[in-house]
Image (cartoon, helix red, strand yellow):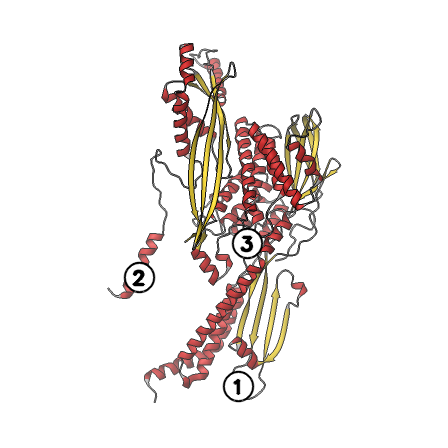
Amino acid sequence: MGRPGDIAKRIYFRNLLRSAGGLRSAACAACAAFLLLGCGPDRRVEARAAILANRPDDARQAINAHYKHRTSEDGEDDKRLDASRHLLLWRLERAAIELNAGRPLAALDHLQEASRLAREARTRSASRALSAAVVNDNLTRWTGEAPELVRIPAYGLLAHLTVMQAAAGIVPGERNPERADLHADRAASAALALADQLQRLRDGEFGSDSYHDDAWLHVLAAIGLHAVAATADDQETVRLFATRAEEAYAKSGGMPSVVGRLLPRLRGEATPPPGYGSIIILEDAGWAPLRQALSLTIVTAAPGNRRSGIDLGGVFIVVDGPGREHLNPLTGLILPGSLIRDLTRGSFGVFGCDIPVLPPLGAPSRLGQVEQTSLEAVDDIAGKVHRAFMDGQKRRVAAIIVRTAVKLIAARQGVNAVQAAGDRKHRAESEAVGNILWFLLSGLIRVSEQADTRCWSLLPGRTGAALLDVPAGLTTVTVQAGDGSQRTFSGIQVEAGRMVVLTVRSFPQGTAVPERK
Amino acid sequence: MSRRREWLLLAVVLLAVGCGSRTDIVDSSVDLHLSGNWNDSDSRVVAENLAKTVATAPWVVAFTEEHGRPPVLRIGRIRVRTRALDDVVDPAIFAADIERALIASGLVRVVANRGEAAIQRSERSDAVAHAAQAPAQHATLAPDVVLSGTLLTQDDQVLDRGVGGGTYKQVKFYQLDLAVADITTTEILWRGAVERKKLISQSTLGW
């Protein structure tokens, strides 16, 4: 007869072992369910597809669903909106949808909020950082990557220009002189904000090691301010921006010829022919690369400690995500059971993590042409996004590996402690409980290691530009976009010596949804 | 009370404190500065300072003595040049604040701006066509001077690095440059500026 405590422990272990088969099955099912949960449709790709199909409502819904946001425009308020860690990103995505849908005022609402959020996001939350250190990077507040942050005022500038030109009667739209004045002022302010943002980029405030300046955005700031310039100070500032652009091109090299024609005009050193005005056509083509998860899972299985018979176990490596075509998606290895048990602590284990990756850059999106003139590439947004991402990739991967290892070590220590607390007389039962616990914990750690794939997924991949000189008066411009579509801008009122800015969005064939998820 | 109950009570209190939102009604004259961006307080304070400066300037006295009446002023275009996309200044609110302050001074007369004047002309035409007591035509009070200018901002920012984090310190400097021009002679009768400076501190680390 044992002591009452021993009897209770024995009954507990027996019951546990009896249900061990069920527990294992349940654990496996739970892990599989967890893994499957992370493999739903990528709403960002759905949003892209909806934009391509000219279904902005579907794109809005996909983005709202992806970031779990609903706003009053959808008939309900989201109480979590202010506390959301994805709010900046949601604003950016929604701004892109509204710009594509030809609703610049709605886009401006989102961009102005995004501008505020980007500034507020400089305050990092210690509690979120702690959570991220324990669980994964998704728990941090999205603060934006350098190429994204500098494009908030850039797209704000273009949106204000679009509204201003319609209100001023430069392009067809509802004429409203007061609104034209208001948005001319705000376009000028956005140009100044863009210049300030470029200064912060140069100061390294956005955390990118190699993306320090953006020559084209200096040109865009100058174009925007030039289009609405009303004072001598404005003209002087345009000249300053043009000079900065020239300096930036001198460092980066390869000034596009269209920029070479533009800069002297912006500096006031050259003008269009007498009686002529200028039209600048800007085409945003394709998509910036979409962050995805490279999933690496290692499953180990080995028989329990046995004194006789063949002691062999297996290690299975499963790889999923971009680039898996270069790897064997499923690799199996047969190894001595004792080795697996020693290395992985238990008979069964699930290890691994998800790593955020960018697929290799494909061929750049084709640009269109206007009036026999091909649009020239002026901004390789996809390349800049890729470069800024790769700047932080080593640190990112190292942090994921260290975090996973620390979690596994902690779990192993916990399992050891549980087993040590067991009775020596019931070593087999303790071992079984330890195995189950280890399997569950290692599975949980694997599932918790989700890649942070957040990015401005609706950002264009490339910008092209063309400069046309047209006689003052009413004119019509037809742009053959890179995707073959034709866009006609009729009723454009061009003033002699002034500049009109027209924007086109295109999705060349093959770049609709370029990456697989 | 058992220890468990104490913990439970504490948890309930903490949850209750952390939950819910609150809306307070604040007097519109109270100065509130949240983000550091231009807001109603800035508009009101700058307009009041400006009105004092404009209305007490020597040109008002000179004009009144010369013409035997106070000058009639119209608020012209006030351009805005801020340096942040979200720093939105509505010149209409700002112009209304200036008008209010100038009227309150009693030293100048203020006529409607061009947009409002167009609306009033339309109203008058409608009344002339349909009303029993039609208003007099060609009795519009013409402005003698136009007040116009530009609101400029200059930002300066540093990051003070500390042991446990840092603090972004930003100075936002708003300067309203204004000029009063005689619309007959285009002579600049007065030029001045009103300034507003704000210091914003933002910690790099929070909870």
Tell me if label 1 and label 3 are in contact, CB under 8 Å: no
Residue at disc 3, secondary structure: loop
Residue B30: percent from the left, percent from the top?
34, 35
For disc 1, the marked residue is A306
Q: Residues within 10 Å of mark 3 (few under 14, many from 20)?
A: some
What label does residue B8 carry, if any?
2
- As measured in the structure, the alpha-carbon distance from the residue carrying label 1 to the one carrying label 3 is 47 Å
From the viewer's perspective, is the residue at label 3 or at label 2 nearer? 3
Q: Quadrant of residue B133?
A: top left
Identify the residue under disc 3: A454
Badge 2 amino acid: Leu
Viewer-closest of A397 and B137? A397
Camera-side residue: A489 or B194?
Answer: B194
In the rendered view, does A262 fall on the left or right side of A145?
A: right
Q: Give the percent coordinates (x, y) of residue B98.
A: 42, 25
Question: Could you say which is closer to the camera, residue A130 or residue A23?
Answer: A130
